[in-house]
């Protein structure tokens, strides 16, 4: 399909998704969220795509938040439905996707923009990036998964500090508290994302999907059982047989995602 607010490129089994609303600091309006849903559904269903790198156009912003103008006339039920729809169609879709998603945070990641990065599996920040959840300054709270995913990454104390003060943190502080995996120079950002994703794409695709599922269940009542079941299911795959054979034969495995 044609995208108005996204730039899509597929190369070396990687889908590059760039949110292309630079004049609006790449804010997430409803059309952009709809396009993200379609782009990720297509990537996850495409056998030629092994993973995704998502970033924002320009140097100023990854995503500077939601498009607040769309919130003006919402009532309680409409607000809840807006949040629920975004969870299901975009943020949970990314977080629960069976292919790795790397967020390349190239500037401001605020509100829904930080929540988009939090839904991704790995986060890399440019050294000029700043991150925050300023929703309480609007009389709101994060509604696209921020209260849950940020807490899981940095703990309730730091999550509450960020959410209740609405203060931004630097890329270096984000790294220190475990919010991002790496901080690099702006010119190295996509290269670092490609380096990490390139390593992942050498591994067994079905095992990658199983690992994402199991890690997502960490801390829940079903966490250990999810791991046990996912581990067992691996033994039904040709990739597991290939991986074990390659190890014993001291050769490189040839995984096919089967």
Image: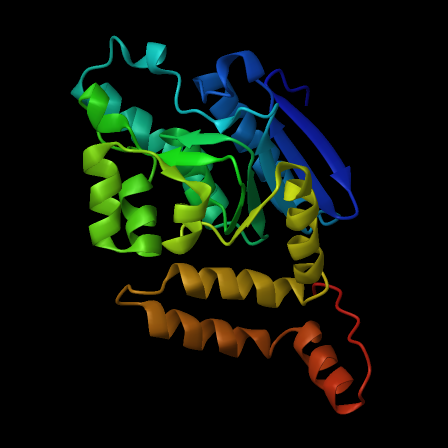
Left or right: 21 with respect to 72? right
- Relative to 68, does residue 257 appear above or below in the rendering? below
Does the rendering let one see residue 88?
no
Q: How is the image coloured?
A: rainbow
The C terminus lies in quadrant: bottom right
Numbered disc total: 0
Does the rendering let one see residue 93?
yes
The N terminus lies in quadrant: top right
Q: Which sits in the foreground, 157 or 73?
A: 157
Residue drawn 72% across and 49% down? Answer: 47
Q: Which sits in the foreground, 74 or 59?
A: 59
Picture quadrant of residue 254: bottom right
Picture quadrant of residue 75: top left
Residue drawn 53% across and 24% down? Answer: 60
- Relative to 236, does residue 56 appear above or below in the rendering? above
**Residue 111 at x, y = what percent?**
35, 30
**Residue 127 at x, y = what percent?**
53, 40
**Residue 79 at x, y = what percent?**
24, 22
**Residue 172 at x, y = what percent?**
44, 47
Residue drawn 51% across and 66% down? Answer: 211
């Amino acid at each position: 399909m044609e995208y108005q607010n996204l730039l899509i490129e597929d190369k070396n089994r990687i889908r590059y998704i760039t949110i292309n609303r630079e004049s609006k600091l790449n804010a997430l309006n409803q059309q952009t969220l709809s396009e993200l849903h379609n782009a990720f559904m297509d990537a996850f269903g495409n056998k030629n795509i092994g993973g995704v790198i998502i970033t924002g156009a320009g140097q100023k912003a990854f995503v500077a938040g939601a498009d607040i103008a769309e919130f003006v006339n919402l009532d309680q039920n409409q607000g809840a439905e807006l949040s629920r729809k975004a969870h299901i169609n975009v943020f949970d879709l990314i977080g629960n996707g069976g292919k790795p998603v790397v967020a390349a945070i190239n500037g401001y990641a605020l509100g829904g923009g930080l929540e988009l990065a939090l839904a991704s599996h790995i986060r890399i920040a440019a050294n000029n990036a700043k991150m925050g959840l300023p929703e309480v300054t609007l009389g709101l709270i994060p509604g696209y998964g921020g209260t849950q995913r940020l807490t899981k990454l940095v703990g309730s104390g730091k999550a509450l500090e960020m959410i209740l003060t609405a203060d931004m943190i630097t890329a270096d502080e984000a790294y220190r508290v475990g919010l991002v995996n790496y901080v690099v120079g702006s010119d190295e950002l996509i290269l670092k994302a490609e380096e990490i994703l390139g390593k992942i794409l050498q591994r067994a695709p079905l095992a990658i999907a199983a690992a994402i599922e199991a890690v997502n269940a960490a801390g829940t009542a079903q966490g250990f059982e999810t791991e046990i079941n996912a581990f067992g299911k691996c033994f039904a795959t040709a990739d597991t047989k290939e991986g074990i054979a390659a190890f014993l034969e001291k050769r490189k495995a040839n995984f096919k995602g089967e």
